[in-house]
Image (tube, rainbow, N blue to C red):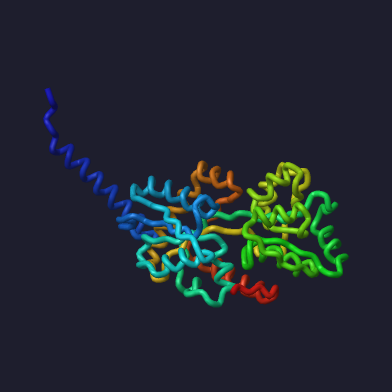
């Protein structure tokens, strides 16, 4: 025999649910977040092809954020023109927090060097959250007898005609790292641009050029196999990823730092929405399995508030511009 519904009990539980909902809304409001967001599908726009580090970071966060918020978070790849196509799409979208640019530090590099962009990224984008960083490594051929940056400097200075370094392209982060190294160490070096990092690394370890800066996945396996030698890295985090090498790499102090990955929205997006999205991303990045997944591709989790990312991005673009002028880096 079925028990009769208890109206008092139903009213009691409904009241509890209402109170819980009210507490949740009030808590979000107290933090300056928009409690009604999200109420529709969010799209993470990645200005690069699938499979790269930016794409992996975006998909890891999108999947977990969708699960936590019970609302779809999709990833859409809009590659082309060095990231300009994807960035332009987001900048022109409605500033409501539902179209989000997940971009690498190349966004800042391009913004600091390219005077012909159809937008001003510092003005036209608003920061949401820093997501991850990946250290770069200074790589040379293993049979040159070089064991330190000082050794590399001595070899370069001994060559009156100067030396050559490789990168994945003009204006790439690898180009900046390598140009800054030559400038800080006081030797002459010419840039050789390649189609990608693998090609640049190959010509370095076969001694067609002297050195290259490469991310962990392109540098660490070769160093562990003895096919390349790592002399330095862009952060202490890079030392940690290289802990099983015979010799720990030096940490470069005069460098632009690790490559980064971050989320942006169009300028004019309400601060309450930016804060809600930022805190959601931070919660996802704190998950142990997400940290482990990113560590597997040589990335360290790093988070920030929207204001902190705005400050970092503004400073980064300005610094890149100065480096570009000093190293005569020009994008046609």
Question: Residue 137 location, x and y as percent?
Answer: 69, 54
Q: In this view, does 282 lie to the left or right of 323?
A: left
Figure label count: 0
Q: Which of 106 and 237 is in front in this view?
A: 106
- Going 37% across and 62% down the picture, which residue do you hit? 97
Q: Residue visible at 31% across and 56% down?
A: 40
Give the camera-side residue of 207 and 287.
207
In the rendering, at what x and y percent does residue 255 appear?
Answer: 69, 64
Q: Give the side of residue 207 with respect to residue 278, left or right.
A: right
| Of 155 and 31, the residue lying toward us | 155
Side of 276 relative to 322 (left or right):
left
Comparing 90 with 316, the one in front is 90
Q: Is residue 28 visible to us here? A: yes
Q: In this view, does 254 lie to the left or right of 115?
A: right
Q: Place residue 187 in its image quadrant.
A: bottom right
Above or below, 76 against 222 in this view is below
Residue 304 in sight from this viewpoint:
no
Quarter of the image for residue 276 reads bottom left
User: Residue at left 59%, top 74%?
Assistant: 332
Residue drawn where x is 62% and y is 70% of the image: 320
């Amino acid at each position: 025999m079925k028990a009769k519904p208890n109206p008092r009990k139903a009213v009691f539980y409904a009241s509890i649910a209402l109170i819980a909902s009210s507490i949740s809304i009030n808590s979000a409001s107290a933090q300056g977040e928009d409690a009604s967001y999200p109420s529709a599908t969010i799209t993470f726009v990645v200005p690069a092809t699938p499979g790269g580090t930016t794409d992996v970071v975006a998909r890891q966060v999108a999947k977990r954020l969708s699960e936590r918020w019970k609302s779809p978070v999709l990833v859409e790849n809009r590659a082309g023109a060095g990231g300009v196509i994807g960035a332009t799409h987001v900048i022109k979208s409605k500033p409501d927090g539902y179209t989000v640019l997940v971009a690498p530090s190349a966004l800042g590099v391009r913004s600091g060097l390219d005077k012909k962009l159809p937008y001003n990224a510092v003005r036209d984008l608003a920061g949401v959250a820093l997501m991850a960083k990946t250290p770069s490594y200074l790589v040379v051929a293993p049979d040159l007898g070089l064991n330190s940056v000082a050794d590399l400097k001595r070899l370069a200075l001994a060559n009156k005609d100067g030396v050559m370094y490789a990168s994945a392209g003009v204006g790439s982060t690898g180009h900046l790292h390598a140009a800054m190294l030559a400038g800080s160490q006081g030797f002459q070096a010419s840039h050789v641009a390649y189609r990608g990092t693998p090609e640049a690394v190959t010509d370095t370890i076969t001694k067609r050029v002297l050195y290259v800066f490469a991310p962990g996945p392109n540098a660490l396996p070769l160093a562990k196999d003895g096919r390349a030698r790592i002399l330095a890295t862009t952060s202490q985090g890079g030392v940690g990823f290289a802990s099983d090498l015979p010799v720990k790499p030096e940490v470069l102090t005069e460098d632009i730092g690790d490559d980064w990955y971050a989320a942006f929205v169009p300028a004019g997006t309400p601060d309450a929405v930016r804060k809600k999205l930022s805190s959601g991303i931070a919660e996802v990045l704190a998950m142990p399995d997400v940290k482990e997944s990113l560590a597997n591709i040589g990335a360290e989790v790093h988070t920030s508030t929207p204001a902190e990312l705005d400050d970092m991005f503004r400073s980064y673009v300005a610094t890149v511009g100065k480096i570009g002028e000093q190293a005569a880096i020009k994008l046609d």
